[in-house]
Amino acid sequence: MNRATFAVMAVLLATSLFSARLDASEQRNVLLICSDDMRPQLGCYGDPTVKSPNIDRLAGRGMVFEQSYVQQALCSPSRISMLSGRYPATTQIFEIGRTLRATMPDITTVPQHFKNHGYHCRSFGKVYHVGIDDEASWSEPAWHSKKPRYGAIGQAAMEARRKEYAASGTVPPARGQGMVFYAGPAFEATDLGDDDLLDGDTAARGVEQLREYAKRPDQPFFLAVGFANPHVPWVAPKKYWDLYDRAALPLARNEFPPKDAPAFAATSGQDFRWYGNVPEGPLDEPFKRACLHGYLAAISYVDALVGRLLDTLEETGQARNTIVVFWTDHGYYMGEHNWWGAKHNNYEGATRNAMIIAIPGQKSAGQKTRALAQAVDIGPTLIELCGLPAADGLEGRSLKPVLDDPNTDVHDAAFSWYPKAGYLGVAMRTDRWRFVEWTKPGQPPVHELYDQHADPQNDVNLAGRAEHAELIRSLSAQLRARFPVKP
Ligand SMILES: [Ca+2]
């Protein structure tokens, strides 16, 4: 062996020993990025219109879950379910308002489990619903930006509304602040910079925290960063609006409620209508286009902020041992079924979300899976990937088998809940069917059935058709074997 060969071999040996030592002892970190009301309208989900290069980049080194479902299509119950690892049937939180501790005072949440095993756990921005946080989940109090949600137009509208109230002395006591906020428009293209707004400031704080963690590599972390966009109002710096040609945006073609669906079930929320510039009654096409334009601009704004977090992981070397989960809290309607700026039901459009999981050195990097996945699976997945002891009471399943092989399944169904008109609906999504059973004390159950292969947006309820009676009996038995009706 000559000297040069020896030198090369020595370097190779040292490098391999060094890597082996890193693999054996270096604890994995978690970066959980949440986005509010972002349906899976992303390049990596096959959407040809949206500009989402950074989330697509994450997908390129992770796995896209094409059939991922949240457990309720409403911000707070969805987040509580994901972060607790429990179905809403267990948390009994179906509304915005109560904290998790109101129903489960002694629960150990997913981040709390990490905290209990030596992780430093932090929350920036909207992770739990704002104002409904869970102190025990985090190592330090949750951080929220004080930067504005609106640009100059929205801020001026709010100020004018405040003055009106002050002059008349008629601030409605319960919704006073809310009524001020809703004076703003449903969308705004602003001249402000990314970090002058709430979401940009949240990303900047996340970047700063990642750099702090990089200085203490022996301290594993679970960092959750949540963005408020693209929840209405769709407020983004003008440069993100400039990415789109409004006249060319494709509008929804199914502007009608699901046919033959129960009237009480085929509804969505109306909060979009509360904003200052939304007219009453039907929306005209220019307004629809402006809304969709705003929604896409807000997605691209969040995408750029996700990119800054990913860049920081790369720059600091933390990408080497940090798992990244990108998760949105439910789907969304932008005109489908004539629902705008809405979720709030048990259909595919509301319950299907975006979820991407990227593990350092992932063998399946860049692949997509049609395996059914749920928000409650995130906890068990991260716990297994980080090598932590199992946590008691988690109701999801680890998706590691799917991450290893996208053709593997860990579920035969995914479940979502929604209360409506005194009924509680449980949706069971199999690969083929969306089956919803609505129950109400003293009333016969009400069913919905959609063929996801033929009718991906749930335009026609098949439950009333005689040829499906046996299928409905079978799906109902499958559902109730898992979630019995409570007396
Ligand atoms: Ca939401």
Image (cartoon, helix red, strand yellow):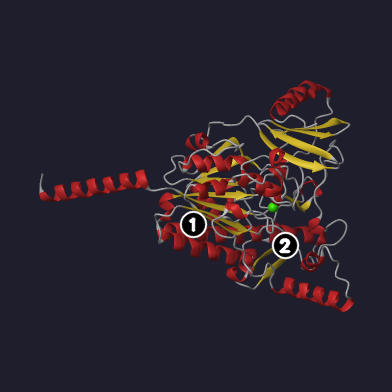
Q: Which mark is residue 475?
A: none
Among the 4 quarters of the image, the one containing residue 187: bottom right
Most distant residue in the front direction: 106
Determine which residue is flagged by label 2.
233
**What amino acid is found at the position of numbered circle 2 in the picture?**
Pro
Find out if the beta carbon at label 1 lies less than 8 Å from the nearest ligand 1 atom: no
Determine which residue is flagged by label 1.
310
Rendered location of residue 16, percent (x, y): 27, 45
Quadrant of image for the N terminus: top left
Q: Left or right: 68 with respect to 280?
A: left
Among the 4 quarters of the image, the one containing residue 70: top right
User: Number of marks in the image?
Assistant: 2
SS assignment at label 1: helix
Residue drawn at the location 79% of the way across and 24% of the way down: 468
**What amino acid is found at the position of numbered circle 1 in the picture?**
Leu
Query: Looking at this view, is 238 or 62 the one in front?
Result: 62
Q: Left or right: 440 with respect to 417?
A: right
The image shows residue 411, relative to residue 60, as above or below, that is: above
Neighbor class of circle 1 (other Cα within 10 Å; few <14, some 14-19, many 20+) is many
Query: Looking at this view, is 153 or 103 the one in front?
Result: 103
Rendered location of residue 379, percent (x, y): 56, 43
Query: Looking at this view, is 100 or 50 the one in front?
Result: 100
Neighbor class of circle 2 (other Cα within 10 Å; few <14, some 14-19, many 20+) is many
Q: Which mark is first along the chain, 1 or 2?
A: 2
